[in-house]
Image: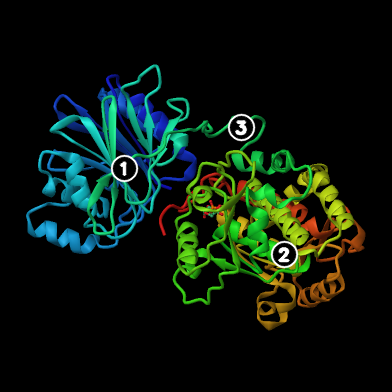
Amino acid sequence: MCGIVGAVSTRNIVPILVQGLQRLEYRGYDSCGVAVHQGGALRRSRSTARVAELRQQIDADGVASGTGIAHTRWATHGAPVVHNAHPHFSGGKIALVHNGIIENHDELRAELQAKGYVFESQTDTEVIAHLVAHLYDGDLFDTVQRAVARLHGAYAIAVFCRDEPHRVVGARYGSPLVLGLGDDADPEARYLASDAMALAGVTDRIVYLEEGDVVDLQLGKHWISERLADDNFAPVLRDVKIVHAHTGAAELGPYRHYMQKEIFEQPRAIADTLEGVEGITPELFGDGAYRVFKAIDRVLILACGTSYYSGSTAKYWLESIARIPTSVEIASEYRYRDSVPDPRTLVVTISQSGETADTLAALKHARSLGMPHTLTICNVATSAMVRECELAYITRAGVEVGVASTKAFTTQLAGLFLLTLALAQVRGTTTPEQEAVHLKAMRHLPVALQAVLALEPQVVAWAEAFARKENALFLGRGLHYPIALEGALKLKEISYIHAEAYPAGELKHGPLALVTSAMPVVTVAPNDALLEKLKSNLQEVRARGGELFVFADADTRIENAEGLHVIRMPEHYGALSPILHVVPLQLLAYHTACARGTDVDKPRNLAKSVTVE
Ligand code: G6P
């Protein structure tokens, strides 16, 4: 989703701005742009193509300066066209980029139009540019403080003014923003970015701005103000952290797409996530975890998208192994509904990025209701989610580039299984022997996953048939119902085939009406206690002429037959079986999308990191 980079320096910072945008590209965007202070005026280049094309345009236009801001945009207000791309200008004086959504933009737009400001875009961002221009009094830092006090909603902004050539001002509320300090090569430089990753290789000295902060960047110096409850601002010092951020996307190697590479990285990602886990102890989740785990008697999981499905899977583990009542809620629903808080709840957020706006807001909402104990399962150690939560388990999936999450999902499941075992230990619901058996199975996962990945050629053969369909139904039961949901989500996201998932027992209560020979029915069939029930559900489909595609454990004895296609998985893997069964569903979605020729890593309309609600 939207990304921000900004800088002041004595050298030309345009290459750093563009490189920063390239590092943020994988998050999804539909236009991009750069604005600089050059020759006493504002200059900009904007494009609806890729950042690489923007770079060519910048080179051709001769855009160069020591002061500038840059942006990747994921359209919310207004179509993805050049005139809506950031940076936005006001009166040839103010240049501004923005992440987030301004909720009172209509009201502000009317007010500014009445004062004579002419709008060139449909964005909420242009409203902020004109508001800053209108309030400008010769001091941009002071002006931005007065401007943001008028905004409702979420924002991270970077702005500069024609009349103050060596100054960039940033502000954040509800969207992340960091300040970077120049390194030995350019000690006078100051940087802004929506993610420290954009500054990887430029500086590792990072200040994480807090909600309501406004920051003033000048050559060799900076100031930060915090927003007080009465909307006034006061100077504040924030710690400088040394952050060794990833440089973003790795090489594709032999793979066609990042998604395929990431599917195949899962054995390594799980091994890395479990590295250093010598035994089960609450302290895996941070200091003081034992005390927290003793103080809670329920779990509330909050997440979005694929992360929500890992939480839905974990509910089965937490209730059956740790015997702890668990509810799982979609973050955007939870944050706005009336719920009954219980202070003895462990609030668990799950997030690949650690930046998802709805999940962060749901976490804060839960805390505001009087639930102080929070834990996150997150893939980005430096993210807002990790900083906001009392406890954390960092998955080590590595940077995930494909918008459709794969290795982040399975590593989240690994983290959630560890949480289950740690809670079970504290609650005395597992014996040391049972714990050792579970841990051994976890350690064997990378090998077991290799065996599943070897099924790829068989999945490719199915994908050819799927590519010609417009609908698909996914069935699962129990622990594997969330896996069916995740399989359907993967297929929707990247192949644009309409897919729905149902608990197989619900088939006769509605979806059976959809079953014809044109509707492929994908079934997750582990050899667990529900297998016989599931086989009855398969008969219900076959009796209606439906075509079944079944991923069956080796020990299930479900055989290929007319209208019944079977891919044989390894033997049943017990409680951890979902981690194996999701993999062929990822491969099915991937190869179906390839056969349909879609943009697999950047599916239409979707973003990797959803930083607006
Ligand atoms: C977006 C991504 C999904 C992801 C979801 C939640 O929709 O495209 O892949 O599952 O956000 O993201 P998070 O970073 O919080 O896990």
Q: Amino acid at mark 1?
A: Val
Which one is closest to the eye, mark 1 or mark 3? Answer: 1
Crowd rating for badge 2 (residues with CA inside 10 Å; few <14, some 14–19, many 20+): many
Q: Within the image, what quadrant is residue 517 found in? A: bottom right
Give the left or right position of residue 484, taking residue 330 as reference: right
Q: Amino acid at mark 3?
A: Leu
Q: Which residue is mark 1?
A: 236
Residue at position x 43%, y 52% in the image: 611
Compared with 494, 195 (above or below) is above
Inspect this view and state whether residue 411 appears: no
> Quadrant location of the C terminus?
bottom left
Q: Which residue is mark 3?
A: 252
Residue at position x 63%, y 48% in the image: 286
Give the left or right position of residue 386, taking residue 3 as reference: right
Compared with 1, 258 (above or below) is above
Total labels: the figure holds 3
